[in-house]
Amino acid sequence: MQHNTPNKKAAADIASLPSFSITSGKGNLTTLSSPRGETDAEREEREYRERLSFIYDMAKELNMGVADLRAANMWMVEANLEPKARRLYGDLWYEGETCILFADTNVGKSILAVQIANAVASGKKPFIPCIECEAGRQPVIYADLELSKRQFLNRYSTPQGMPIFLDRGLMRVELNYADWEILQTLGEKASFEEQLMDDIEKMVKNTDIKVVVVDNITFLTSCTEKTYDAMQLMKRLISLKQRYGVSLLVLAHTPKRELHRAITGNDLQGSKSLLNFADSAFAIGLSRRDPAVRYIKQIKQRNCEQMYGADNVILTRITKDAPVEGFLRMQYEGYAHEEEHVAESKQKSSRAEAVVKCREMYERGMSVRQIAAETGISKSAVHSMVQPQPDA
């Protein structure tokens, strides 16, 4: 494993520490005599410096695997020498991040993802004033694992059928099952998902493209709800990011969810593993006020403070109208509190759920008092939800 050259000052500080000699196998230290007149505090300081020196020396020999042991200060020195991560899609996605964009089916994940990819390729704002693309123009690989080329064209063409051409730096990948079947007949045993990841890695390695969008994650693993499968997938993606300096945007689904609830990280399919390994994540919600309105909510971030949480979601409207007629996109509409777009049926739905729950508990033989104690609902409210009966 190759490592970056340590900062000169940090290396000099390390070299100035006393070093141990190894006498009988790794980890054994020579016994050093204490200087005359040494105080207890001076002795403790000397012994600690000697121990640190030994650890530094051993780290050079031990760092041969996947775990890299260095002083925390050295990691910070090296990080400080690296360029600061720039915004690829405002504060929602930074350079060098593995970012997850998730939403329910047919809410507009792919629409927004292409919009983002095209903005990165062109270096221009993606129809949303608050979103900056400060990383400059960069070619992008968009792995489209859902749409055919005809379906893709339909999204980016005028009513007369004329294509609305995207930025020339946007490279699109489409699935080719035929070639994989040929590989299988030649004795290649890799699964389709493994072959796909290998192909994407080859494209990154040979083109030096640093931005990749994967639409969507369900094609890369057979079952993202299973923790092991999700972990293996994220490890592969993180390896791709670290080996080639790639910024990844991965699209994912949410399981069926109640639309009156606010979106959280728990709504991500396979969330326990996927979200833990991701650097950042944001989601698209469907407004109950207007079927064409969507809101974008920040779920996880590491490079900045949360800007677009529940009290400040970004409102957008799906459109193909002017100023870019034929370009299916999300057009900026302003900001709002998430509850304004999910609360329409929240009270009604919550009440209905409480009624069902209380009646089930009552039918199991629980008293009104017991139900009230367990649910936190007042006894009078429980009485109104079930047929009045004397307390047990």
Image (tube, grey):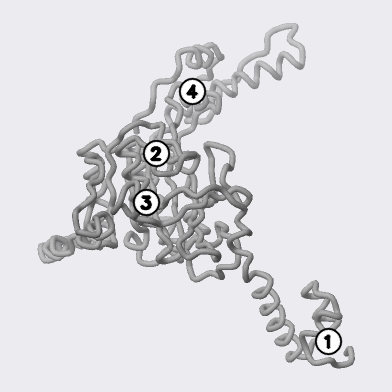
The disc at residue 24 is none
Q: Is residue 382 above or below residue 144?
A: below
For numbered disc 4, what is the local secondary structure? helix
Q: Amino acid at mark 4?
A: Asn
| Residue 204, x across and y down, in percent | 25, 42
Q: Nearer the viewer, mark 4 or mark 2?
A: 2
Question: Which residue is the site of mark 2?
Answer: 125
User: Quick one: label 1, few (<14), some, or many (20+) residues within 10 Å?
Assistant: some
Mark 4 vs 2, N-terminal side: 4
Name the residue nearer the viewer: 125 or 36.
125
Q: Amino acid at mark 1?
A: Ser
Left or right, 250 with respect to 373, comes to: left
Question: Which residue is the site of mark 3?
Answer: 113
> Which image quadrant: the C terminus?
bottom right
Q: Amino acid at mark 2?
A: Lys
| Residue 273, x across and y down, in percent | 49, 56
User: Label 1 to label 4, Cα distance in Å?
Assistant: 63 Å
Residue 175 visible? no
Q: Is residue 336 above or below residue 7?
A: below
| Residue 147, x across and y down, in percent | 26, 62
